[in-house]
Amino acid sequence: MLDYATLKVIWWLLVGVLLLGFAIMDGHDMGVGTLLPFVGRNDVERRVVINTVGPHWDGNQVWFITGGGAIFAAWPLVYATAFSGFYWAMLLVLWALFFRPVGFDYRSKIHDARWRSTWDWGLFVGGSVPPLIFGVAFGNLLLGVPFHFDDHLVSTYTGSFWALLNPFALLAGVVSSAMITFHGAIYLMHRTEGEIQRRSGRAAVIFGGLLLLSFSAAGIWLWQGIDGYVITSAVDPGALPNPLGKTVAREPGAWLANYSRYPASMALPVLTYLGVIAALLLAFSGRTLAAFVASSLAILGVIGTAGGSLFPFIMPSSSDLRSSLTVWDSVSSHLTLSIMLWATLIFMPLIIIYTSWAYKVMAGKVTAAYIRENEHGAY
Amino acid sequence: MISEQLVDLSRLQFAATALYHFLFVPLTLGMVWILVIMESVYVMTGKTIYKDMTRFWGKLFGINFALGVTTGITMEFQFGTNWAYYSHYVGDIFGAPLAIEGLMAFFLESTFIGLFFFGWDRLSRGQHLLVTLLMAVGTNLSALWILIANGWMQNPVGAEFNYTTMRMEMVDFWTIVFNPDAQAKFVHTVSAGYTTGAMFVLAISSWYLLKGRDVEFAKKSFRIAAAFGFASVCSVIVLGDESGYTVGEAQQTKLAAMEAMWETEPAPASFNLVAIPNQAEMKNDFAISIPWVMGIIGTRSLDKEIPGIKEIKEKNRERIISGMEAVTALDALRKNLDDAEMKARFEAHKADLGFGLLLRKYVSSIDQVTPAIIEKAVDDTIPHVAPIFWGFRAMVGLGLLMLLIFSLSLWHSVKGSFTGKRWLLRLALFSLPAPWLACELGWLVAEYGRQPWTIYGVLPTHLSVSTLSVESLYGSLAGFVGFYTVLLLVEMYLMVKFARQGPGSLGTGRYLDEAAHA
């Protein structure tokens, strides 16, 4: 068995990998959902757009479910505190997600323009709301969240839902939305042709540009305007988790300290810029699959930058500094982390293999002709 | 102190969303195997009608599956949003099976369901059958891990409390996986799902036969459903009995409530066929009993006693009093983790910590406890008997009704005479709601019967909730009711529409009613 401190760091990386998997896989079909009403101008076009992700959205959504499950298993205090604290934000995500399974499966089962258009907007909500809220939530993590624990580790959140919608967090929401929509646009360029592909290309330029602008703005704001958090007591990474056993302080520029401490981590923000530019260049030169890889790397850049800035914090508390949750003190037991690592090492490669096979089976452009031939079978 | 209202609303929301989710899950569990059977026959015989059967019943399966997925996400969110202290207190154990469910099962099921619907023209027959099979395996493994998690709530093995981290921690993973409660629940629940799937296909096929339409298609579907349903309903009953036996061992309280057994009878105990339980006076106002039966079901013996509710309460009183010591020591240890005297005191009473925590419903500090409060806590350890007693009997009655229907259906399938037996077809059609009712009642008996605990003997329901405002709960409950009502109407509309259209909805030109929706 690996030692406890190492496992804690590995699980920080693994949760990152799962969030990344979610953003790349579920992200592209959420991006497709967001763009659906705009790049598909008539019923056949919209069905083309929907069917690019038709066989895959359900599998992709499991990245989200498993990510949630993994946070529950590996960071139970984070799962408990964040989900209950962000109660209304989480419910909005949940209710927005309701539109996806039924939207995909029910939309084309009835020949009625109003029915179909209703579900198209449902898919838009299901695709656009979750990334926006996740971005806003991440922004609030960087600002710190008002919650505290009592002696028995009962958490109480003392903020309101509206307080989450502050300017910096909204900017983070724009970063996240732009990132997912950009990624969806690149995917659509890969899987469609003609008009839809052309419109998706335009969307890729707009949202790629927006991503770089908002990402840069958020970075400058974080550097100049936001106090980060630091642990001021001695840290024993291998100790039993006890979130109340430390002291924490706020310091200007602390969120950027990791980049001077580990200069190699500067590669993460740089990857965002390179990924977006490479994805656009590759997509417009027809190498759309490579473009998808590049936009996935851009996502790695964004998520890595946010997570890396926070490290070792996961969810800092603005109202009771020592209640802040970190990689060292919000984790499961040594045994649970170890078992979950084995489960991940065994199943993750299998998941990647059969997911790739599913994409290979369904590979190729989705066309209007395909929709007409599969009137009763396609979404 | 946590308000009663917050706890009640949180429970109501969880119960409503879980019962709703469980309208869709059993059908998925069962129909997926019926699809495997139909497609296997297609691959073996090459007859197109079996492919059409797979595709048509698959279409109805898909309509149901969409809501299963939708409402399943709610369940995963809800532990965190509404049961935050529960999530912290037992997440070390409870989170693992949920995460493994995602990794091992849900990915498999959800990836292959896409290929099931869209891969017909891109896969060979054998490959497509493999896809369907993997989808079925994924679905059932999913149920396995969920019920391992649930089984642990009923019988929390393989874990210990740690006062430094203030939570339960896993000490033996395999004990949790092979928890007899979890295994008995898994087989009972999936068989109930298989029965639901079979009843669904049987009832709708019967309707086509009564209407005299798509007769070949309906006859073949009826036969498969009858055979599969007969096997399933037999196993649901046998394995249900087995789960009665494991309940008897691990959770005597639930068993006593299911049987309205107030007194400890000399072994072997009698079985109350019907009774009017009177909780206030702890007796049955009326009962018809069959001697010996309960002792045999509950203990598999003629000489072991089953404790009645009064005896259980006496034991619980002792545990609550011992638990007070554990809570007092824990409170002191949380202020000073190195207090050696308190450590020793805590270790001596640790096993009764959960029972001591029951008092937190009434007092924030243990020195405020009075004998009257202890009495209230003792009363709390017994769930409401009447709904559990009657819920259990209604579930068993519905199971026996379905045993009758599937036996007759299989008998007449073998004889080849079922198409003429209109009374049988009508009986099958009108019994369509039976498996759903039975499944929901089974959930009620298992989960309501576990009260006042979320984790039996370890964590009271009362302490498990998130510290939310009552207004938030009213708001979210209203939202769920609204969304779920609309979703149910839409789902029922589509289900009825496509069931009415029948296999003609595939647009193959081989079935009735093609013109109506071409």
Image (spheres, helix red, strand yellow):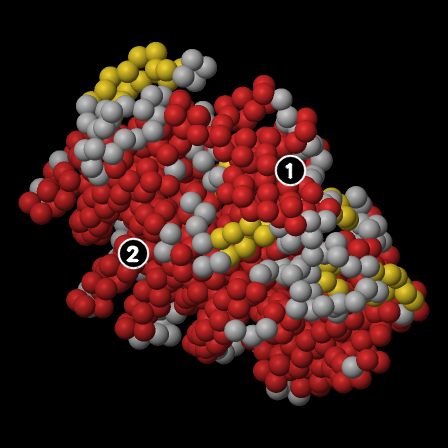
* Residue positioned 56% across, 75% down in the render: A2
Q: Where is residue A273 in the image (x, y as percent from the top left)?
A: 77, 80
Nearer the observer, disc 2 or disc 1? 1
Q: Which chain carries label 1?
A: B
Give the quarter of the image for residue B213: top left
Marks 2 and 1, Cα distance to the nearest angstrom? Answer: 53 Å
What's the amino acid at mark 2? Trp
> Can residue A333 be seen from the camera position used here?
yes
* Residue positioned 40% across, 56% down in the render: B175
The residue that disc 1 covers is B328
* Label 2 vs 1, first from the N-terminus: 2
Element marked by disc 1? helix
Viewer-nearest residue: A78 or B369: B369
Element marked by disc 2? helix
The residue that disc 2 covers is B33
* Residue positioned 22% across, 43% down in the render: B238
Q: Where is residue B413 in the image (x, y as percent from the top left)?
A: 12, 46
